[in-house]
């Protein structure tokens, strides 16, 4: 039998398969589906929920029930998706899970978006009182500013445990205890806020129920600020928000909603709407020059990008000895936070240092943590950014405000911090920061105009990319990784003296910010992050400018206020410092 | 391959060494007998022997601490093979009498001989003890006969001869063929053909692969594997080395639960001794074949007996089963091809190599060849570890070897295969004990636990007991097992508490079937067996609990009512004085009465009453 001719039969239909990792993928490819609560295409198959069981009939007549997410497809088998036996199993699995579940669905963050709820409806589950009910409600862990864990909603599918391990290599979450006493929790039962968690939110992104959700306590605070006539509320939103939020309103993944977001934010009541893409351009100005400076003057290399707060916390807690590699540039959110505080009261009437409230909309849960950093505290004790909401929370706000996002007419952002270049917009996808930096660095180093701005080898959601660049004689090597599991390998490489690259771009989430923990949930379809990435590339392609230093508002900012990249004023506003957090993090346990 | 050690010569030397020991007195030093004080018995014998140079026929005496004889309830066992005698229940105070009377003066000590439970008479020759006489001991052949901590004693009984043979012949495929032809099937429970498993693993020869011995014996009351590891560790090591040679592995792990400290100690010593003598380690017997064995102590989770959970545990991960396929033969320990066999399976391997596949397949029945060890416990006269040919009937085991039911009670049921097995009844007494017949009857060979139950056993309570075990031992990974066992236990607890409803029976059965069909690993797939088999054969007992609020066996406390028959009561006050909670009232010479609200149903009064006036129901 040749490789390309393998077939099996699903519900009477002959289906070809080749390199699908499991039967479930073959079933989906054939346009059919089975329910699952624990399978995630980007994680290893776990086989725990037993919802995807199917009845398999072998050519010799033998029949067996197996979970399709773990079974490799075999030629010649007949697969039955909905036999009495498998339906009974699925139904009872749902009943048993629900019996042991905190069924306060109406007040659950996941209500309407919960996979358990969805299947309970599809399978017509009506009574679960006949089974052992959850006896003791455990305390909700809201110790983290980014995430909330509610074990009363946990169905032990292990997706969060796998995400934390397989993406980030951190194993912050793990299983404890045995049998029906099993729980998921950070090591030694510590609260998440006091663990090694880097707040990336990938656990929440794969959670089928409301067991791990985004900490959205600031949503009310933002509404309060907006409705308070004394306050002037300024908002910024990050690159990848624009290509994902539409999914919450039935728009296709990857569709660019920049202008719709501008309009929606104004209708909600924000007083000024800026774009984090602008400060991404600003980051490039600072970071590209920092890189060139280090390269030319014997500074610490490889230089690490510093836009990703999960990655920064990872270094501070796991590799504090590597902090001098990290760029001193604040992230785009941080830079925008600083310039809003500094210049909005100067530029806009009615805005004062006291009445200004700064909000940012991020695809990222770790940004909530970043905004609370000591280094981002102002002289009066307030944080430069008051509140951080995720894409998901913005979606909820738009719905709550009664705005029809799908049809709303687009608007332009406020000026001066609203214009952006293609370099700024691709920050949202892995490789984007490096590509944007290369565009500017090339022109700065060579003094020539870069004709072909796209660096294909830096693109795509692949976890590791290495690219060599020739800046007219100056050869540099750039390594781009996403997920901290890969970043950890780089740290080892560097410590062992095996790293031959000068720039390391790291984004903690698989694929970059487009797949951040605060984005609309997309864990059942790996294709969505590709579509979002394409959305950003398209934004780059169709924009008016493609290099950060061409952004007219950036030029204006330097001309009027900052003088030049890495100037004294720029350092004061746009650069930051890092601290060794290892000692704070590793308390007593096992040591 | 050429060998530079002559195994036959080694054997002759070892046998000579044993001859020089003079009169051998075997004292069981298995876990059971050690608990009964056998170390003191050994010490006392040695003390006496050291001072005496004249024995009737021997110039000296050697005390041999052995592994388990299997007859644990009669421990401490002292066997003097040359005098064909077995002493039972020996205490340290008895040693001097045995020594003076029998060893020095040839006069057996009658009172310490085994008494046949049926006739009550002392059995003088150990061959006549039914418990041993009706067994066929092959895997356990040396257990209790040799000093388990001496490699010479193992070599004297042909230890490592089979390994030398396969290395010398250098035909790994031939070894696999022999195992296949022998019909050996996995002794850990599943009964998968061993030769086939070896073949699948050997198909991946070339790279790194492993042999893993599953010694995570977790069934309550089962101790077959422990006995082999404690009593004849070299046989296991030899079996593993042969397996390694056959499949092309050079490294192995024995996974033993930490609750088996003696087995671990003896295995460690055996590995060290074998490495020193070049029976293990680098260049075995001077050949190119190297084989290293590590010991991995498990923390005692029942689920780690499941092969994929065991692999995860060796790797340092949480002991949770992984979905199959991929099977360990292709992707096992550290992602490498891995052969996992149970202790007893591997212990059979050297015997098959030495005696031939035909010898092995001549024992047993059509589909299940060879012998199988069982841990016989419960309400039988002779409990202990036994080995019988596959296909032996339950009747032969319980009534011949086991000596029948204790106290003349009536046989009710037997639980086979531990918490994963099922309950069989009187009608099954004559079915053949083999893999397929037992599965058909709703039980399984499992690891070989046999719990015999008499008429006064409550089958609902039995189901509850096993369900409590599996519920606690479920790893918590898959929903049917984790939630299903919990719910089944809840229902069973409700029924034994007298609060059951008829709908509970349907619910229980539905749960059992879902857990069986839907679970991820063998633990969950078999966990409902005790429930399903008792529901099948003893449904009337469930119904009696629910509808009549009665426990027919009088076991379930909630439904027990202890009463005094006023006609029979003479008012002796003994019951009132015995009652620990003051629940019995009455005056001298007048009938007494039990205050049911105070009674804790301990039955102390029932046993105390001299007039049999108190009954339970």
Image (cartoon, rainbow, N blue to C red):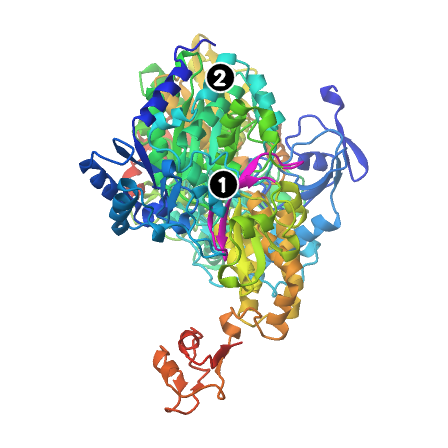
Q: Is residue B311 left or right of residue B484?
A: left
Quadrant housing residue B103 = top left
Task: In this rendered view, identify the residue nearer to me: A8 or B310.
Answer: B310
**Which quadrant is the N terminus of chain A positioned in?**
top right
**Secondary element type, mark 2:** helix
**Which quadrant is the C terminus of chain A positioned in?**
top left
The label number, if any, that marks residue B165 in the structure image: 2
Whether residue A330 appears in magenta in the rendering, the answer is: no
The label number, if any, that marks residue B305 in the structure image: 1
- Residue range in magenta is B365-390
Residue B213: percent from left, percent from top = 47, 32
In this rendering, the answer to whether B202 lies above or below A348 is above
Residue B44: percent from left, percent from top = 23, 44
Q: Is residue A30 left or right of residue A257?
A: right
Q: Residues within 10 Å of mark 1 (few under 14, many from 20)?
A: many
The residue that appears at 50% across and 39% down in the rendered structure is B309
Residue A475: percent from left, percent from top = 43, 11
Residue B425: percent from left, percent from top = 62, 56
Task: In this rendered view, identify the residue nearer to me: A196 or A304.
Answer: A196
Task: In this rendered view, identify the residue nearer to me: B45 or A148.
Answer: B45
Mark earlier in primary sequence (1, 2): 2
Q: Residue furthest right?
A: A12
Quadrant housing residue B234 = top left
Q: Is residue B284 visible?
A: no
The residue that appears at 27% across and 47% down in the rendered structure is B95
Q: Is residue B526 left or right of residue B6?
A: right
Whether residue B370 appears in magenta in the rendering, the answer is: yes
Q: Residues within 10 Å of mark 2 (few under 14, many from 20)?
A: some
**Secondary element type, mark 1:** helix
The residue that appears at 32% across and 24% down in the rendered structure is B17
Report if the CB atoms under discs 1 and 2 are less than 8 Å apart.
Answer: no
């Amino acid at each position: 039998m040749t490789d390309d001719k393998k077939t099996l039969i699903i519900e009477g239909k002959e289906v070809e398969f080749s390199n699908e990792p499991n039967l479930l993928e073959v079933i989906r490819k054939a346009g059919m589906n089975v329910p699952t609560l624990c399978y995630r295409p980007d994680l290893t198959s776990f086989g725990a929920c037993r919802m995807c069981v199917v009845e398999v009939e072998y050519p010799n007549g033998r029949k067996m029930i197996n979970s399709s997410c773990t079974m490799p497809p075999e030629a010649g088998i007949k697969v039955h998706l909905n036999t009495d036996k498998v339906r009974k199993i699925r139904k009872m699995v749902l009943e048993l899970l629900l019996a042991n579940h905190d069924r306060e669905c109406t007040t659950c963050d996941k209500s309407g978006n919960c996979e358990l709820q969805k299947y309970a409806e599809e399978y017509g589950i009506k009574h679960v009182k006949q089974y052992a009910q959850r006896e003791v409600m455990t305390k909700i862990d809201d110790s983290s500013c980014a995430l909330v864990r509610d074990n009363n909603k946990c169905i032990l599918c292990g997706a969060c445990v796998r995400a934390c391990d397989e993406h980030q290599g951190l194993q912050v979450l793990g299983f404890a205890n045995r049998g029906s006493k099993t729980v998921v929790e950070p090591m030694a039962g510590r609260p998440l806020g006091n663990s090694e968690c880097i707040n990336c939110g990938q656990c929440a992104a794969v959670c089928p129920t409301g067991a791990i959700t985004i900490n959205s306590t600031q949503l009310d605070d933002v509404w309060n600020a907006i409705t308070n006539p004394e306050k002037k509320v300024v908002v910024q939103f990050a690159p990848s928000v624009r290509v994902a939020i539409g999914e919450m309103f039935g728009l296709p993944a990857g569709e660019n909603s920049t202008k719709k977001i501008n309009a929606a934010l104004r209708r909600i009541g924000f007083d000024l709407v800026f774009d984090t893409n602008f400060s991404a351009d600003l980051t490039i100005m600072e970071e590209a020059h920092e890189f060139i400076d280090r390269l030319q003057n014997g500074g610490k290399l490889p230089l690490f990008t510093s836009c990703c707060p999960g990655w920064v916390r990872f270094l501070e807690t796991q590799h504090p000895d590597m902090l001098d590699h990290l760029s001193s540039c604040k992230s785009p959110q941080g830079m925008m936070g600083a310039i809003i505080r500094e210049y909005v009261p100067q530029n806009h009437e009615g805005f004062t240092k006291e009445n200004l409230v700064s909000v940012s909309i991020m695809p990222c849960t770790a940004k909530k943590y970043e905004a609370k950093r000591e280094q981002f505290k102002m002289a009066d004790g307030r944080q430069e950014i008051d509140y951080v909401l995720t894409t998901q929370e913005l979606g909820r706000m738009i719905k709550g405000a009664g705005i029809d996002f799908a049809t709303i007419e687009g608007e332009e952002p406020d000026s001066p911090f609203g214009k952006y270049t293609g370099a700024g917009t691709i920050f949202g996808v892995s490789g984007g920061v490096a590509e944007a930096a290369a565009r500017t660095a090339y022109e700065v180093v060579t003094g020539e105009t870069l004709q072909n701005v796209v660096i294909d080898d830096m693109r795509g959601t692949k976890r590791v990319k290495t690219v060599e660049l020739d800046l007219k004689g100056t050869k540099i090597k750039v390594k781009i990784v996403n997920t901290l599991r890969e970043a950890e390998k780089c740290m080892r490489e560097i410590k062992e003296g095996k790293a031959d690259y000068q720039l390391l771009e790291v984004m903690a989430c698989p694929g970059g910010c487009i797949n951040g923990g605060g984005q609309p949930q997309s864990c059942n379809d790996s294709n969505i992050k590709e579509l979002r990435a394409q959305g950003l590339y398209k934004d780059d392609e169709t924009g008016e400018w493609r290099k950060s230093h061409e952004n007219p508002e950036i030029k204006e900012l330097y001309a009027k206020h900052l003088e030049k990249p890495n100037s004294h004023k720029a350092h004061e506003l746009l650069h930051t410092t890092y601290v060794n957090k290892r000692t704070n993090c590793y308390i007593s346990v096992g040591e | 391959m050429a060998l530079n050690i002559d195994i036959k010569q080694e054997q002759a030397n070892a046998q000579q060494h044993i001859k020089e020991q003079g009169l051998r007195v075997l004292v069981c030093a298995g876990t059971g007998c050690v608990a009964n004080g056998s170390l003191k018995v050994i010490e006392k014998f040695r003390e006496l022997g050291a001072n005496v140079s004249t024995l009737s026929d021997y110039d000296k005496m050697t005390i041999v601490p052995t592994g388990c004889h299997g007859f644990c309830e009669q421990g401490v066992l002292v066997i003097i093979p040359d005098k064909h005698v077995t002493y039972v229940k020996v205490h340290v105070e008895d040693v001097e009498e045995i020594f003076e009377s029998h060893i020095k003066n040839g006069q057996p000590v009658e009172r310490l001989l085994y008494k046949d439970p049926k006739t009550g008479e002392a059995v003088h020759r150990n061959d006549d003890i039914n418990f041993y006489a009706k067994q066929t001991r092959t895997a356990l052949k040396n257990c209790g006969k040799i000093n388990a901590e001496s490699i010479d004693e193992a070599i004297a009984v042909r230890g490592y001869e089979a390994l030398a043979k396969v290395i010398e012949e250098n035909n790994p495929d031939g070894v696999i063929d022999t195992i296949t032809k022998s019909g050996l099937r996995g002794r850990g429970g599943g009964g998968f053909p061993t030769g086939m498993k070896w073949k699948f693993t050997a198909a991946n020869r070339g790279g790194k692969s492993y042999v893993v011995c599953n010694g995570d014996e977790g069934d309550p009351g089962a101790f077959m594997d422990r006995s082999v590891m404690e009593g004849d560790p070299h046989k296991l090591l030899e079996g593993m080395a042969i397996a390694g040679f056959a499949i092309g592995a050079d490294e192995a792990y024995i996974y033993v639960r930490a609750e088996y400290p003696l087995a671990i100690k003896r295995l460690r010593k055996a590995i060290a001794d074998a490495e020193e003598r070049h029976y293990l380690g680098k260049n075995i017997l001077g050949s190119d074949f190297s084989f290293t064995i590590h010991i991995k102590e498990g923390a005692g989770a029942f689920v780690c007996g499941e092969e994929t959970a065991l692999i995860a545990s060796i790797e340092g991960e949480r002991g949770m089963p992984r979905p199959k396929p991929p099977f360990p033969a292709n992707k096992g320990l550290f992602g490498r091809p891995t052969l996992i066999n149970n202790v007893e399976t591997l212990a059979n391997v050297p015997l098959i190599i030495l005696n031939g596949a035909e010898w092995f397949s001549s024992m047993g029945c059509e589909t299940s060849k060879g012998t199988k060890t069982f841990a016989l416990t419960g309400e039988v006269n002779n409990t202990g570890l036994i080995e019988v040919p596959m296909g032996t009937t339950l009747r032969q085991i319980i009534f011949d070897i086991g000596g029948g039911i204790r106290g003349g009670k009536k046989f009710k049921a037997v639980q086979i295969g531990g918490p994963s097995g099922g309950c069989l009844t009187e009608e099954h007494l004559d079915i053949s004990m083999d893999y397929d017949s037992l599965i058909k009857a709703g039980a399984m060979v499992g690891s070989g636990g046999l719990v015999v139950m008499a008429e006064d056993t409550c089958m609902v309570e039995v189901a509850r007991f096993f369900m409590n075990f599996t519920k606690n031992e479920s790893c918590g990974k898959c929903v049917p097992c984790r939630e299903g066992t919990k719910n089944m236990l809840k229902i069973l607890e409700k029924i034994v508490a007298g609060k059951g409803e008829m709908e509970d029976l349907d619910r229980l059965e539905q749960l059992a079937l879902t857990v069986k069909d839907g679970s991820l690993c063998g633990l969950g797939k078999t966990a409902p067996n005790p429930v399903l088999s008792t529901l099948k054969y003893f449904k009337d007992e469930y119904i009696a609990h629910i509808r009549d609020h009665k426990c027919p066996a009088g076991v379930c406390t909630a439904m027990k009512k202890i009463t005094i028959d006023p006609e029979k009561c003479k008012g002796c006050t003994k019951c009132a004085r015995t009652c620990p909670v003051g629940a019995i009232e009455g005056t001298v010479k007048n009938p007494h009465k039990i205050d049911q609200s105070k009674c804790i149903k301990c039955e102390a009064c029932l046993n105390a009453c001299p007039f049999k006036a108190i009954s339970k129901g």
